[in-house]
Amino acid sequence: MSRKSPSRGSRPRGLPGTYESSYCESVIEAGKRGDSFEKYASSIDCHTDTLLEWARKYPDFGAARKKAKQEMLNFHMNIGKAAMTGDHKHAVGADGKPVVKAFNTAVWIFWMKARFGWREDGPADEDDTANDVAFKFT
């Protein structure tokens, strides 16, 4: 028995859907939350390959994907910046109470290397616009 997605009508879960121009704005918003393109694909009940095809076929979605990647990188860089300045210790929870969380620098560095291709000597691929940040761990 195939599961049906409530947001995608009667099509079976995971099968390619129909492109909607509203996906341009929502993929950028996902990037602003730090969500990966893969997570966004799951959130609209599509496979990542479908979204990559849309990015090739629809220039507006291709541009939105690039903007989303930029926003996602910005989100994660801000986490590191907050940790360096101590701002992460001043976070406030949904209940309005202060939330003090320990920041694990090693985990953050690993995440940035794994997710964004950062290396000890700079970006892994100079041609990848998502990795244009000249960041070195020296």
Image: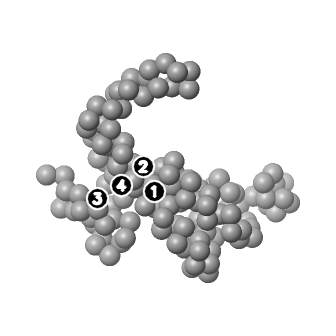
Residue found at x 36% / y 55%: 114
Q: Is residue 121 left or right of residue 37?
A: left
Residue found at x 71% / y 61%: 14
Residue found at x 82% / y 63%: 11
Which mark's residue is nearer the viewer, 4 or 2?
Answer: 2
Question: Is 82 above or below relative to 133?
Answer: above
The amino acid type found where label 4 is placed reads Ala
- Mark 3 lies on a secondary structure that is strand
Residue 3: horizontal and vertical position, in percent?
A: 80, 53
Residue that carries the numbered disc 2 in the rendered image: 75
Residue that carries the numbered disc 3 in the rendered image: 118
Residue that carries the numbered disc 1 in the rendered image: 71
C-alpha distance separating marks 4 and 1: 17 Å
Residues at discs 3 and 4 in contact (Cβ within 8 Å): no
Residue found at x 52% / y 72%: 63
The amino acid type found where label 1 is placed reads Glu
Q: Which circle's residue, 3 or 1, is located before the other in the chain?
A: 1
> Most extreme residue toward the left, as rendered?
138
Which mark's residue is nearer the viewer, 4 or 1?
Answer: 1
Residues at discs 1 and 2 in contact (Cβ within 8 Å): yes
Q: Is residue 69 left or right of residue 112?
A: right
The amino acid type found where label 2 is placed reads Phe
C-alpha distance separating marks 3 and 2: 15 Å
Residue that carries the numbered disc 4 in the rendered image: 114
- Mark 4 lies on a secondary structure that is helix
Which mark's residue is nearer the viewer, 3 or 4?
Answer: 3
